[in-house]
Image (cartoon, rainbow, N blue to C red):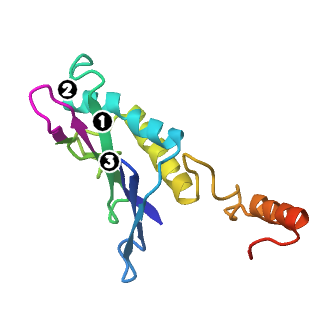
Amino acid sequence: MRIAKVKIKEGLVTIVETAGLGTADESETTRKIYADPHPDFRKTMEDLEPHVRGILGWPSSYAENRIRISGVSFSFSEKTGVEGAVMSGLVDLDASDSPFSFNTPHLAFAPYCETGSGKLMPDDAIDALEALRAEALAFLKGKRAQADLFDDLGRTIVSDVREIVADLRDAYGSAPAE
């Protein structure tokens, strides 16, 4: 599975995964999870902001503290194996109650061919995008703002619930069914 898109909107995280790219079994799965992401996940999205400024040529003083990165779409060329990305976001404006929406241009992570001379995603932006993808995977495995739902091996954490049920049985002689 490959993460193809990550989007965070108040109370909703959308992650699109693709599998079997370029094959007859190619599939896309969209997961919409109504849960607050872990602070690490939010931070990796926020950490894209200076990279967006650089790509768009915006000075650091422009819209200070008013730019929100809301999503990233990743691309993958089956032919060359080269990845790329587009970052999307919003800028809160003084002149409007509605934000200004933007997308960066698509930038590849590497040249599509040896003689390629197109603009590429900066290396530090690629690192930040990889950190976002890692946090998205952790989110899918249960890493949330409130508490982690799974242990490091991907097993559901139920031992605490079982202990609580056992304590209720001890205290009251019965407990709700598990």
How packed is label 2: few (under 14 Cα within 10 Å), some, or many (20 or more)?
few
Residue 159: horizontal and vertical position, in percent? 79, 61
The foreground one among 63 and 83 is 63
Depth check, mark 1 against mark 2: the one in front is 1
Q: Are marks 3 and 1 in contact (CB under 8 Å)?
A: no
Q: In the image, is residue 177 above or below residue 11?
A: below
The segment highlighted magenta reads 88-101
Disc 3 versus disc 1: distance between alpha carbons?
A: 9 Å
| Residue annotated with mark 2 | 57
Mark 1 is on which residue type?
A: Arg
Residue ID at (20%, 26%) = 57
The foreground one among 168 and 33 is 168
Dot 2: element: loop
In the image, farthest residue toward the left: 95
Q: What quarter of the picture does the C terminus occupy?
A: bottom right
In the image, farthest residue toward the front: 172
> Is residue 99 one of those drawn in magenta?
yes
Disc 2 versus disc 3: distance between alpha carbons?
A: 19 Å
Dot 1: element: strand
Q: Quadrant of residue 16?
A: bottom left
The foreground one among 115 and 159 is 159
In the image, farthest residue toward the top: 61
Residue 101: horizontal and vertical position, in percent? 17, 41
**Dot 1 or dot 2, earlier in sequence:** 2
Position of residue 102 in the picture relative to residue 133 (left or right): left
> Is residue 15 one of those drawn in magenta?
no
Residue ID at (14%, 25%) = 94
| Residue annotated with mark 1 | 68
Q: Quadrant of residue 171?
A: bottom right
Q: In the image, is residue 59 above or below residue 113?
A: above
How packed is label 3: few (under 14 Cα within 10 Å), some, or many (20 or more)?
many
